[in-house]
Image (cartoon, coloured by chain):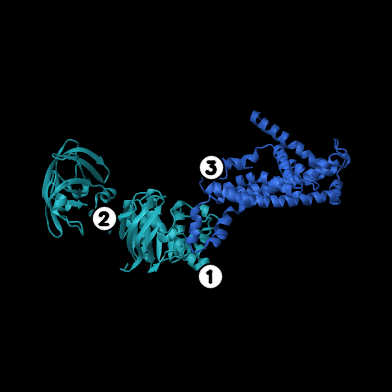
Amino acid sequence: MKIRPLGIYALLYLVFLYLPVLFLPIFSFNDSAIVAFPLKGFTTRWYENLWSNEAMQGALWNSLEVGIATSVISTVLGICGARALTRYRFPGKGGIAALIMLPLVLPEIIVAISLLVVLLQLGFSLSLFSVILGHILMCVPFSIAVLSSSFEGFERSLEEASLDLGEGPAMTFFRVTLPMVAPGILSSLLITFTISLDEFIVAFFLSGTEPTLPVYIWSQLRFPSRLPDVLALGSLLLVASFFLLSVAEIMRRRAARRAGASSTGGFL
Amino acid sequence: MNDRNIIEIDRVTRKFGEFTALDDVSLQIREGEFFSLLGPSGCGKTTLLRQIGGFDDPTSGAIRIDGQNMTGVPANRRPTNMVFQSYAIFPHLTVAQNVAYGLRKLRLDRQERDRRVKEALAQVDMAHLGARRSNEISGGQRQRVALARALIMRPKVLLLDEPLSALDKKLREQMQVELRHLQRQVGITFILVTHDQEEALTMSDRIAVMFGGKIAQCDRPEEIYQHPRNRVVAEFIGGMNFLQAAMLRESDDMIEVDVAGFGRAEVRKPAGVTYNGSTLANGGLTIGARPERMTLVFDGDGGHNRVVEGTVVEASYYGDMTYYSIAIGSLEKPIVVSMRNTIGRRSLAAGEKVQVGWGPESLVPLL
């Protein structure tokens, strides 16, 4: 068989990208407190430990709370933003769009520190609420990017056709607008939830005494004996993120197809 | 078709900021009529259609449908349905679900609903495609679905916004015939917006030609074509030669004119016009002459008794017809005369001398 340089490059690239991540689940089933080869034997001990770890569960609930609040609020803001940016023309539109999307490329640590300074100056105490604020700031651009593809191709005459066929504005929204953009909304909810669930730096700076899951994981790294627990937790987080983002991308493509746009140039 | 007016447009004006899209338009459309709004883009025809459908409101004036004033009545409560230019087929629904969309409000039982959907789809030859997803059908089929979806509502008036402009020529011609046939079958008033003069001429009972937010002329297709009121209408519909003439005499319905390059003739006066000699003494009158209303007399062949001498400047061959540009002695610009290429007709070459046959019926005075 002919050796193709590009094929080799692609293979190396994928190995570099995913092999380290694969170690996580492998060691999480390894029957040894020391994370090293050779593997000792199969165990589900570390996962059982998680089951009884109350601090971890507290962190999990914190993360879910933050994730759900963040995804709902940033998706609602994203719907408004995406609809405004795709449907209307107004002065300063380009500049406004750029400013909204800017947090995508700002270093997280800068965002985190500035938020910390501002919140403390304003007299807020750090809590999950401040984490939610920080996460919304980071998630709105993602939400707008995802929703834009379902609003972009949305033809106004579809809503007019519904009115023409006797439905009022409310039923038109439920029978036409919502089904058309629903996959996009769902996709945005899943993506922003996942980002919030996995986010560390902003949560680390702003979470105060209530750690989110990534912050909790980081705190456990100081104890070598807890490392396998962390690996088990990390594996679960990995699976959950992968699943949520896959569903989100499928939904986004469906939304774009419904709206009539081509589904190439995927966001993820 | 009867003489009852289903739609009365009463001095409707629509302004978008400084721009006047409709300028004091009044119009009556009769029940059961196939009516066309014809004009170039930006003439206000689509705005007028959207006003009838309830998607836009007049700045002033009123629209009555079946005697009811429609001011403030939204689209969902008007007895009209629209076939959109883009068809606006709901992409998340199947063909049958699209057609059934408007029936929800009628609260029909399932069997009755399915029966009506089937009937509506059969009406547009789509009975076998009800289960298809709407992104799996062609452009022509989308147009049929849009038609069925509107007709199933049994509207008093069906509005069609350039419904054929997205189709290729062959399909368009076929749909023109089908649409006309369908309209006769269902007996509903159709209002068609189009910029295609041929489409308007072949399909309509009556046509309103619009320019700059005003109705330039509203009449039967033959009248619009044979007796365009003014130069703009004449130019927009078909080919036309414009000739200068002086008026010699005016009677009740005829005028006698002396047409430059041709000579004297007595022609029909435009309806409702009285020339008084003074306005005509300066500048004279513009006379239109369709290329096919004149003949070329050669090899002893020709229909008209009056002839003028000319020279062929150019011949444009169209298959069934040839259009000749012919220079006539005293005229600045050559005139265009068309000739049907029937058996035995030979072609003329540039430079050949020819006689152009004409008569009073070749000429139309324009305002």
Along the polypeptide, which appears first: circle 2 or circle 1? 1
A4, A21: nearer the viewer: A21
Q: What's the chain of the residue with tag 1?
A: B
Q: CA distance from mark 2 to mark 1?
A: 46 Å
Q: What's the chain of the residue with tag 2?
A: B
Question: Which corner quadrant of the image does residue B160 belong to?
Answer: bottom left
Residue denoted by label 1: B107
The numbered mark at residue B224 is 2
The number of numbered badges drawn on the structure is: 3
Q: Give x and y (percent) for residue A69.
A: 70, 52
Helix, strand, or loop for circle 3? Answer: loop
Of the residues shown, which amino acid type is indicated by label 1? Arg
Horizontal relation, residue B305 to residue B228: left or right:
left
Helix, strand, or loop for circle 1? Answer: loop
| Relative to B325, residue B188 above or below | below
Of the residues shown, which amino acid type is indicated by label 3? Gly
Residue denoted by label 3: A92
Horizontal relation, residue A19 to residue B150: left or right:
right
Q: Are marks 2 and 3 on the same chain?
A: no
Q: Which chain is blue?
A: A
Q: Which chain is cyan?
A: B
Q: Residues within 10 Å of mark 3 (few under 14, many from 20)?
A: few
Q: Residues within 10 Å of mark 2 (few under 14, many from 20)?
A: many
Q: Give x and y (percent) for residue B318.
A: 27, 43
Q: CA distance from mark 2 to mark 3?
A: 49 Å
Q: What's the chain of the residue with tag 3?
A: A
Q: Give x and y (percent) for residue A30.
A: 85, 42
Question: Which corner quadrant of the image does residue B161 belong to?
Answer: bottom left
B347, A173: nearer the viewer: A173
